[in-house]
Image: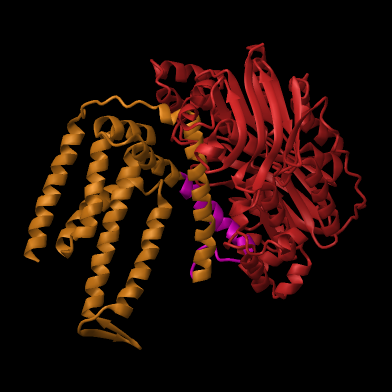
Chain colours: A orange, B red
Amino acid sequence: MKFNPSILFLYCLTLTIMAFLVKSIEALALLVSINLTAGLIIGIRRFKSLVTAFILSLVGVLVNALIFARGEPLYYLGPIVVRTGAIYGFIEVSLKLGLLLSATLLFTSLTNPRDLLRSLESELGFPKHISFMVSLSLRLLRVFEKDLAEIQLIRKSRGFRATPITLSDWESLISPLLNLGLERGRWIGIAAELRGFSLRKIKKTCLKLGLNDYFLLFLLLIEIVFSTILQLKS
Amino acid sequence: MKEILRVHVKEAGYEEDKPILKDTTLVLNEGETLLLVGPTGSGKSTFIILITGVLTNLLYGYVKGSVKLFGINPLDPNDFKVVPRYVGVVLQSHELQLAMQTPIDEVLFTLENLGFKNPLEKAKKFLKIYGLSDKAEDDIETLSGGEKKRLCLAASTVHEPQLLILDEPTANLDPWGVGEIIRYVREMKRKGKTLIITEHKPEYFTKLADKIAILENKTIKIVDKVPSEYSSYKRKYKSVKGTVIVKVENLSFQYCKSCPFILENVSFNIREKEIIAVVGPNGSGKTTLGKLLAGFLKPTAGKVSVFEEQPYMLDRKELLKKVIYIPQEPDYFFVKTSIRREFETVSKFTGLEFNELLSRVENWIASSLDDSPYRLSFGQKKWLTFTLATLYDSRIIILDEPTVGLDPSLIQKFFEWLEHSINKSTFILLTHDVRVVEEIADRVFIIENKSMREVGIEEGIRYLKQPVEEAVK
């Protein structure tokens, strides 16, 4: 399935913005059910670790909700009091994260860095440096997956668990990942400049839309309308 | 002859008053090949980013002096922009310079930047020249190390610049990949291109070089020939026939059910206090074998036993007592943001006092405790991984490409370290480096076409030397 990268970018950007703005659980559930299903079908094979990170983050969301949420007590699980706010908060934040994951999976699976770079700068008129940064993130995400898998294994040779549990475990995983990511970003930028990125000339072109793009725009319109109605109702 | 490069630098570096290069004067004419040698961390890569203008324009460094490249001043921000029209630069690490997802996109990126007409046709032609036509649309992450290096060459030279700069072009490559690079340099020279090559193994390019320069004590000097600082290591340690501690029986491995087998029916034994070299082409399965022995992966079929236990089934702390794996990329091995905290981590897992650990490390490490391990030079990072691994006192140490990025004197030091540590540990070295086989290994295994066989030291040396020698001739 091929989409115009700019339309896909706008679609996923809108989903991301909605994840921050929409508060209605019904609206979020609607958005997540459509997009996460599609995102998982398309992207789970390539981005397993993103999905794993999402599932792990839900544990954090749950703990956070149980500790900090307010409201009427609903259940008592030993010393833990489950309040109404905890249930509501957990569902809301999980759905928001789910929507962010959907946008990421759709975006990263359905386009490639070069098409995106050309489309953003020529069709949407984005500055070339911003377009390059966005498109580079697609490549880095894939490399990040590789680095993550490698670091997880090698941490066993330093005495850590392959799957992080404690704060120290997390630090030992995130620290090399961040440093490698920064190093890559820096040198890829240098390599791009040495391959003439500053000389890159942008030729403005009109958006070329296919049937798939019209479908995506239509779907986005429906999602915005229904989410707004549900948001206003709640 | 037309002058291509003139460097007259009093001082240059990343921070004022901390110069990396001093009092350097150098002239390079059209069609000449300059071979730049020097110890690890001496500033060879800094020289490259200095003459291309990256140091001052992108890395906030400083230069006191002047650089003229094709008549322009690359230190000036406006001239810096046009440097790529004249120069093609292949950086040391191929992992750190590929920006796109497929080889064809990577090559097209350069051509589009430089405004070429019909870029697709040219990109396809270049991929064919570099033997990557069949993989033009593949994901870059599925390419082997050698293929990635070739792709970097294609992407950096597709616009056919007059000056080619190759920073450590043979690093991480197997002997066949090295042979390809040597042939490539010869071909470029035949075409009249000007070349600057930095290299830890200068013997690969000495016959092709018109000028040889050495970077030492922050200064570049033109010399008549490469100083023979590398003399063969004289091994003092005598092999002992210890007990068998690693037993591999009919081992087969594939990463997933639909994936091809990496290893098939591999069997061998390793004895205590041996230094084993496992050699073979890029992508032949050396690293996978190392990970199987280190307990990171579970065999698909067959059995791996380390001290009569299957390593993948061991608890992480038990595993660490028996076997430790040091990856090729040192950054993967670090887990904390300062060297001090790295040692605290070792202390936590070994129960040894922090001060006792410090007494066992070299002075430069003990005096850099608050530095980040990620900020060290590549050679220093490598050395720190060796040091950390030794402190765990594991019985088997597996080192993946340990000599990559080490200059000749550091390699000598590495061999000394191996001999010094042999009373405590057994070493398995996954390598392309003929010096490992020639000067330190007890036994050699060749891993090729999914299988593994033991060969004599002489055959191992021949196996690694032949492809390079043919290319050098």
Find residue B52 and report its image quarter. top right
**Which of B422 and B204 lies nearest the eye of the viewer?**
B204
Q: Is residue B274 magenta?
A: no
In this picture, residue B400 sits left or right of residue B413: left
Where is residue A120? Give x, y as percent: 29, 35
Q: Is residue A147 magenta?
A: yes
Q: Look at the picture and state if B1 lies above or below B363.
A: above
Magenta extent = A143-165
Q: Main secondary structure of the magenta part?
A: helix
Report if residue B92 is visible in the image: no
Where is residue B394? Give x, y as percent: 73, 63
Where is residue B76? Give x, y as percent: 50, 31
Find residue A231 and report its image quarter. bottom left
Report if residue A68 is visible in the image: yes
Q: Where does the C terminus of chain B fall, quadrant-wise?
A: top right
Which residue is depicted at the point 70% across and 56% down?
Answer: B384
Q: Residue furthest bottom?
A: A79
**Which of B408 and B176 lies nearest the eye of the viewer?**
B408
In this picture, residue A96 sits left or right of residue B38: left
Q: Look at the picture and state if B437 lies above or below A208.
A: below
Q: Where does the N terminus of chain B fall, quadrant-wise?
A: top right
In this picture, residue A178 sits left or right of residue B459: left
Which residue is depicted at the point 21% across and 29% down?
Answer: A207
Which residue is depicted at the point 7% across and 57% down?
Answer: A229
Q: Look at the picture and state if B322 lies above or below B126.
A: below
Number of numbered discs present?
A: 0
Which residue is depicted at the point 90% across and 47% down?
Answer: B235
Where is residue B133? Give x, y as percent: 50, 22
